[in-house]
């Protein structure tokens, strides 16, 4: 039987206030108080894994060990069938600008263009199916852990459409739909997303009777 979270504090292995707010809202009904690794001054461990599961566990274990509390981490990204599953765990890396001319940071249009260029290089009629993945990992200080995997299948379109999403959302059309993730109202997107799928599995396992 999977170990369950009790009420009390849970460290969210992130330095992103937006992600903390999103996860806190999802877990608040279950009596969980979320605190971020950033607010505790915990360092971000190198994500050296080659899968979403490995990277989520690296982050969860590091936060749990440092804080002495249960910790939750997520790792997510886009996999494109025709590109052998890439960008995968390197989804965010493909958006990294070079550190020159004082302009560091991420350029998601550049990243989307890179994916599209590689697809076009495969020629007309190439498979444009893709999927967003999300892995949620919980780690306890004694080494016990639990993993939940979510997925949202779809296909890629070009040019990008919509301004309500982020990352690769403007080129991703979920299966059975016609609008991109960036054209769908955030509430509707969150209900069908890869993260929603992973959280539903976590809630069913951790809190449902």
Image: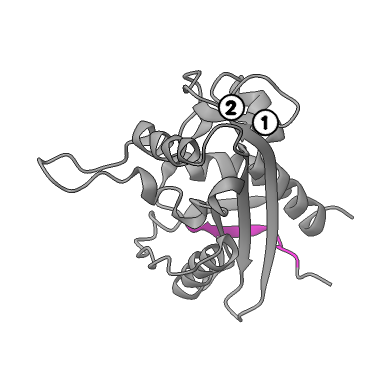
User: Percent from the top left, x then y, of residue 161?
Assistant: 50, 19
User: Percent from the top left, x then y, of residue 71?
Assistant: 56, 64
Which residue in the protein does label 2 denote? 181
Is disc 1 placed on a helix, strand or loop?
strand
**Vertical arrangement, residue 26 with respect to residue 174, above or below:** below
**Vertical arrangement, residue 65 with respect to residue 206, above or below:** below
Q: Residue furthest left?
A: 101
Is disc 2 placed on a helix, strand or loop?
loop
Magenta span covers which residues?
4-13
Q: Are marks 2 and 1 in contact (CB under 8 Å)?
A: yes
Q: Nearer the viewer, residue 170 or 193?
A: 170
Q: Quadrant of residue 10?
A: bottom right
Question: What residue is rendered at 47% in x and 35% in y?
Answer: 120
Judge whether residue 76 can be spotted in this image.
no
Of marks 2 and 1, which one's residue comes earlier in the chain? 1
| Badge 2: residue crowd in 10 Å (few <14, some 14–19, many ≥20) | many
Q: Is residue 73 magenta?
A: no
Q: Is residue 7 magenta?
A: yes
| Badge 1: residue crowd in 10 Å (few <14, some 14–19, many ≥20) | many
Q: CA distance from mark 2 to mark 1?
A: 7 Å
């Amino acid at each position: 039987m999977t170990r369950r979270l009790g009420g009390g504090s849970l460290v969210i292995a992130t330095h992103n206030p937006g992600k903390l707010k999103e996860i806190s809202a999802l877990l608040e009904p279950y009596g969980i108080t979320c605190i971020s690794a950033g607010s505790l001054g915990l360092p971000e461990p190198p994500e050296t894994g080659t899968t979403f599961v490995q990277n989520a566990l690296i982050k969860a274990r590091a936060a749990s060990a440092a804080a002495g509390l249960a910790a939750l981490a997520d790792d997510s990204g886009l996999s494109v069938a025709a590109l052998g599953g890439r960008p995968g765990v390197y989804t965010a890396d493909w958006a990294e600008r070079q550190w020159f001319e004082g302009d560091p940071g991420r350029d998601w249009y550049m990243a989307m263009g890179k994916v599209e260029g590689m697809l076009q290089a495969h020629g007309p009629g190439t498979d444009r199916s893709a999927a967003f993945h999300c892995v949620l990992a919980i780690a306890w200080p004694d080494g016990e852990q639990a993993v939940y995997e979510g997925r949202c299948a779809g296909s890629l379109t070009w040019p990008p459409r919509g301004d309500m999403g982020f990352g690769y959302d403007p080129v991703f059309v979920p299966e059975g739909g016609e609008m991109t993730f960036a054209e769908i109202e955030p509430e509707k997107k969150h209900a069908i997303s890869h993260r929603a799928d992973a959280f539903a599995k976590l809630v069913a396992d951790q809190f449902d009777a």
